[in-house]
Amino acid sequence: MKQHAVQLAHGVYAELEDASGTRGTEDELLWLDIQGNAEELTHFLRDRQIPAFIRRRVLSSQRFPSVFSGTDYVLLSVPARRTWEQKRSVSITFLLFTHEVITLCRDDGYNFAGERKQIAEGEISGIHSASGLFVYLLDSLLETNIVSFIQARSQTENLSAHADNAAGRISERVILDTRRQINHLVNQFEDFFYGLADLHALTPHPMLSDSVRERLRDIRDAQNHVAKNALRLVGRLSELLQHCQFMLQQQTDQRLRQLTVLSAIFMPLTLITGIYGMNFSYMPETGWKYGYYVTLAGMIWLAVFLWIVLKRKGWFR
């Protein structure tokens, strides 16, 4: 299990070696960032004396966002991923208490190392309460989602440019894989938005002041905007896929037209060859001294004549 314990007291950052028995107080805010499997998280929550009904909700295998609250806690589970290429999102659970924030993740797919570094270096100021830290971490998830969206948009634009420059020769498999990955990203964005919407819809809670609710509303609206824009990328990729399929169909039609032209040119020649390949005892032309040369010249003239006629009709375009 990976455990990081951060203590904030009067704006001073301190990372604790061992948080066993340490609790947040009115003067000292405690943040525990935990990663581990289900068994490790179970032991951790039991050691922290987290009630059994909260443990069951934290360890639930559900993949959709969830929000629960009590008089002295708020629980929020949302999906997240570091980059848009990440194959699947992971579920992050926030436990908000009066003077303590716990972030839990079952997998190694996400961590708050960057956020801890920012706080330690004094880049983030104004975190004086558990709800303030809670909102800051949610805002950092939103920023990560925006970065993932920008990466997905850049990939989509590169594919569009490549399709235009290469006259539709881009692989359909690349487009399908990109669209599938962005679809996963859209699902994650929507789930994150639903979790924030449920959190904002909680009845007045002592740990969610009006200022905190206002910041949560801003994060929710921004996430909704990102989700809608990501969904537009899926539409653009679908149009790009149709364009590539159309270009491929055109190439196929052109090849079939060329084969048709070749067949039209060589069919009379094949007929002539077949006629003179017959094994009859009496064929007048076979005894003529110039028969072979005349027949060959006629076949060449016929091929050139058909080629000129078909070219004028536009069959070679």
Image: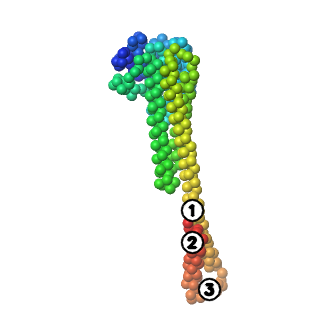
Residue 139 position (above or below residue 278): above
Nearer to us of marks 3 and 2 is 2
Q: Residue 70 at x, y = what percent?
A: 55, 14
Residue 283 position (above or below residue 52): below
Q: Residue 254 at x, y = what percent?
A: 57, 62
> Given the image, on which type of amino acid does mark 1 rest?
Gln
Q: Most extreme residue toward the bottom, as rendered?
A: 289
Q: Residue 163 at x, y = what percent?
A: 50, 52
Mark 3 vs 2: CB contact within 8 A? no
Q: Which labelled disc corresponds to residue 254?
A: 1
Q: Secondary structure at mark 1?
A: helix
Q: Secondary structure at mark 3?
A: helix
The image quadrant where one finds the C terminus is bottom right
> Given the image, on which type of amino acid does mark 2 rest?
Lys
Instruction: Tell me which corner region of the image, top left, top right, bottom left or bottom right, holds residue 18.
Output: top left
Q: Which labelled disc corresponds to residue 28?
A: none
Dot 1: within a 10 Å radius of its alpha carbon, few (fewer than 14), some, or many (20 or more) residues? some
Give the side of residue 121 with respect to residue 145, left or right.
left
Dot 1 or dot 3, earlier in sequence = 1
Instruction: Tell me which corner region of the image, top left, top right, bottom left or bottom right, holds residue 10.
Output: top left
- Give whichever of 109, 284 is nearer the camera: 109
